[in-house]
Structure formats: C-alpha cells, structure tokens
Image (spheres, rainbow, N blue to C red):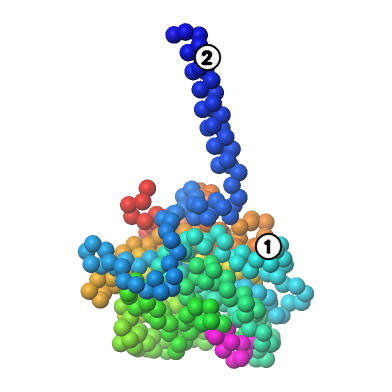
C-alpha cells in the first residue's frame, strides 16, 4: 500500500476518533431535567415509550388489543402538598423554591412529567387546599395547615396528572369554604377528585373507572368495612368496570401497615375493589397481592412541601397495567419507579426525581422486601420493567 493511501487512512481514522469524542462530550453535557425528560429514569429504572400527548377527549376513546381486550396503564403516587404552611411565619419553603425557579409554577413535576404523559391515567393524593380562605378555626392547634393560591392548580394537568384523591387530614385546613373552593378549582383545571361520598368517574380508552377515597381516623375501620363494598357496588351500577379505592390511613412514619389497615385493605378487595392505594405515613410500605388484586399500603411522600429535608426522601411511583375484556378487569402486571422526592440530595426542592444510582434503587427494593416479610400476601419481587422489556 502506498504512502498516500496510508496517510489518507490515518486522516480518516483521526476524523472518526474526533467525531466519537465529540459525541461523548455532547452526551455528558446534558442537564438533569433534560436527562430525565429523555430517559424517564435512566439506569435501573423503566423508561416509558415516547408517545404523543393525548387530549382528555382522545384518552376516552376505545383502544383494543388484537384479542379484543383493552390494556390501561395507570400511575399512582403518594402525597402532593404544595404552597405554604399557614402556621409558620415568613415566606414558606415552597415559595422560596418557586423564587429560585423564576416563578415557574410547573417546576415540581418536571422530572416525572414524561412518565405521567406516557400512561393512560395518573392519580395523586392531593393533600392541602387551593384557596384564599383563612385557617380552619377548629384546627388552630395543629402544627401544619396547608394552603396554596388557586392558580397553582395548573401544575397538575401541566405535569401529566389526570385525577386526585382528596380525602385526607389536610383537606379541611381552611374549613368548609376552602374545601369547597379547592374542589371547584380542581374541576376548573379538568382534574376530577374523589372524596368520601363524592366518587370520581372517569372514562379511559372507552372503559369507565371509578375512584373512591376515605379517611380511617377515629377508628372507622369496622364502619368502612361495611360501607365501602356498598359504594363499590354503586359504582358498578354506574357502569364502572374498574374501581380503585384510596385510603388515608395508618400512623405517620410507619413503614408497615397496622392490623386494622391490613384487615380493611383485604376486606376492600373482598368487597369488589380492583386496587387499593394507601397514603398518610410519609413512608413507603410494601405491596400485597391478595385474591388477584394489589394493595399498596403507602406510597409515601411525593412532592411534599411540609419539610425542607425529610429524614427519608425515598418514594416510588406505582404503575399497573389492567386488562379489560368482556366487562371484566384483571391485573396484568405492575412495576415501581423508585424516586427521591427531590431532584437534590442536600435539601427538598419538591421535584420528585427517579433514582438512577443502583444503590439508591436497591435501597428502596430492600426496604419494601424486608418490611413485606411481615405480611402474609406480600409480593416477592418489585419489577422495574414491564414484562418483555430489556
């Protein structure tokens, strides 16, 4: 081979090497927000397939699989608490973070929006109020009373949230007036809510889904064991093929449900529910698979403006695929997406962010499995990817 050919080959090799290095440098120069928008989790966490965002009307339209069934993918999270604690003086930690984000009220869901937009239904527990009403005079001794301006509600649909559970111990922080206004504000943003005796009925892919929500405080477990099956039956009469029950229950900081929660959770499945979702403890709890249905005892915090740095900032998004055929819904598969409630480790910035480090993901899995050993029907594995995904 002549010297000219050798020189030419060397030049081509150098160009290719430079191109590879350039691409590597470009890959490293990606912001955290961009990374999660593209990967929705990164190493060790599932990445939803990109798809066009559907309008609310488009989400209602029937979609059938080859076997005639309809598969619905749903996401659930724990507590979403935004705005200010009326019992604290000065500018709230949420408002301070909003200043850092240059007033962009959509900042909390920036790292999970792509996940929520890729599913068919996203439901969060909204724990607070959206109102200008004052403090509830019956709760003046409470350490926390949460309130956010009504316009903050826009972050929910913008972030991919489709509906909320609104039956918890902070729903009345601004009294009857604030509670009523919050409900109207949610509806004005296209966000259906479920509270006791006010179920939400949604239509997704041609399937009617009913959401129920309850508090269990003051020893209501036996009462609810009698009441909830009747409410489920009423939703079936309304044509709901899928019925999901939300409970605000248990004790704060508990990693394991108490006996009353277990008793009520299983009775709810026996009473006809397709799924039970729990919250309130601010800590993640294990999942049970009971009589072919899942009971998520607590999804912990999510976007939580009640504390600048909770001792445990881990949480997870619970995603489930239900297959509906011939008017019957069955749990097809589930995954979890382990997250930190903040995009930062040094303080809570209220922006839930999927974990990327294997050690953090394994920590969440370890906690769930260890505490699940105390439950008879606890799931043995917590999949991070859907069946068939690499």
Residue at the location (75% across, 72% down)? 91
Classified by dominant secondary structure, the portion drawn in magenta counts as: helix
Where does the image place residue 283, in percent across and percent down from the top left? 54, 67
Mark 2 or mark 1: name the one nearer the start of the chain.
2
Report whether 216 appears left or right of 139. left
Q: Is residue 165 above or below residue 133?
A: above
Q: Nearer the viewer, mark 2 or mark 1?
A: 2
Q: Quadrant of residue 74?
A: bottom left
Q: Is residue 69 above or below residue 381?
A: below
- Judged from this view, the residue extending furthest toward the right is 90
Question: Where does label 1 land, which residue?
Answer: 101
Q: Is residue 186 above or below residue 71?
A: below
- Judged from this view, the residue extending furthest toward the front is 4
Residue 177 is covered by the magenta coloring: yes
Classed neighbour count for the residue bearing mark 2: other residues with Cα under 10 Å, few (<14), some (14–19), many (≥20): few
Report whether 17 appears left or right of 233. right
Q: Secondary structure at mark 2?
A: helix
Residue 118 is covered by the magenta coloring: no
Magenta stretch bounds: 174-184
Where does the image place residue 89, in percent across and percent down from the top left? 77, 77
Q: Secondary structure at mark 1?
A: loop
Q: Quadrant of residue 383?
A: bottom left
Give how far apart the Cα atoms at labels 2 and 1 are: 53 Å
Residue at the location (33% across, 55% down)? 387
Front residue of 374/176: it is 176
Which quadrant of the figure contains the N terminus? top left
Report whether 316 appears left or right of 266. right
Classed neighbour count for the residue bearing mark 1: other residues with Cα under 10 Å, few (<14), some (14–19), many (≥20): some
Residue at the location (42% across, 59% down)? 51
Visible in this render: residue 293?
no
Question: Where does label 2 land, which residue?
Answer: 7
**Looking at the rendered structure, which numbered label has been put on residue 254?**
none
């Amino acid at each position: 081979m002549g010297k000219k050919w050798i020189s030419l080959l060397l030049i081509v090799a150098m160009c290719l090497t430079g191109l590879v290095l350039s691409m590597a440098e470009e890959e490293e120069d990606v912001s955290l927000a961009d990374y999660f928008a593209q990967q929705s989790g990164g190493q060790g966490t599932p990445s939803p397939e990109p798809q066009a965002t559907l309008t609310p009307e488009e989400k209602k339209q029937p979609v059938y699989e080859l076997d005639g069934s309809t598969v619905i993918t749903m996401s659930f999270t724990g507590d979403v608490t935004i705005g200010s604690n009326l019992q604290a003086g000065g500018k709230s930690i949420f408002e301070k973070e909003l200043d850092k984000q240059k007033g962009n009220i959509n900042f909390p869901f920036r790292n999970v929006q792509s996940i929520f937009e890729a599913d068919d239904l996203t439901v969060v527990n909204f724990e607070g109020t959206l109102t200008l009403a004052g403090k509830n005079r019956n709760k003046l001794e409470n350490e926390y009373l949460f309130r956010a301006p009504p316009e903050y509600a826009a972050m929910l649909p913008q972030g991919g949230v489709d509906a909320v559970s609104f039956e918890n111990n902070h729903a009345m922080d601004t009294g009857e007036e604030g509670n009523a206004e919050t409900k109207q504000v949610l509806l004005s943003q296209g966000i259906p809510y479920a509270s006791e005796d006010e179920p939400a009925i949604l239509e997704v892919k041609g399937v009617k889904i009913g959401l129920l929500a309850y508090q269990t405080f003051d020893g209501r477990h036996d009462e609810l064991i009698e009441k909830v099956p009747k409410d489920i039956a009423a939703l079936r009469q309304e044509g709901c093929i899928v019925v999901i029950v939300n409970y605000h229950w248990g004790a704060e900081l508990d990693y394991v449900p108490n006996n009353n929660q277990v008793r009520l959770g299983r009775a709810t499945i026996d009473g006809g529910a397709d799924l039970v979702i729990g919250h309130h403890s601010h800590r993640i709890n294990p999942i049970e698979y009971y009589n072919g249905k899942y009971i998520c005892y607590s999804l912990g915090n999510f976007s939580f403006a009640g504390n600048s740095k909770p001792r445990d900032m881990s949480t997870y998004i619970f995603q489930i695929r239900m297959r509906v055929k011939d008017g019957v819904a069955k749990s097809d598969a589930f995954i979890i997406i382990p997250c930190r409630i903040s995009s930062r480790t040094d303080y809570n910035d209220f922006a839930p962010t999927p974990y990327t480090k294997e050690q953090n993901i394994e920590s969440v899995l370890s906690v769930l499995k260890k505490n699940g050993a105390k439950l008879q029907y606890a799931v043995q594995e917590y999949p991070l990817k859907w069946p068939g995904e690499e």
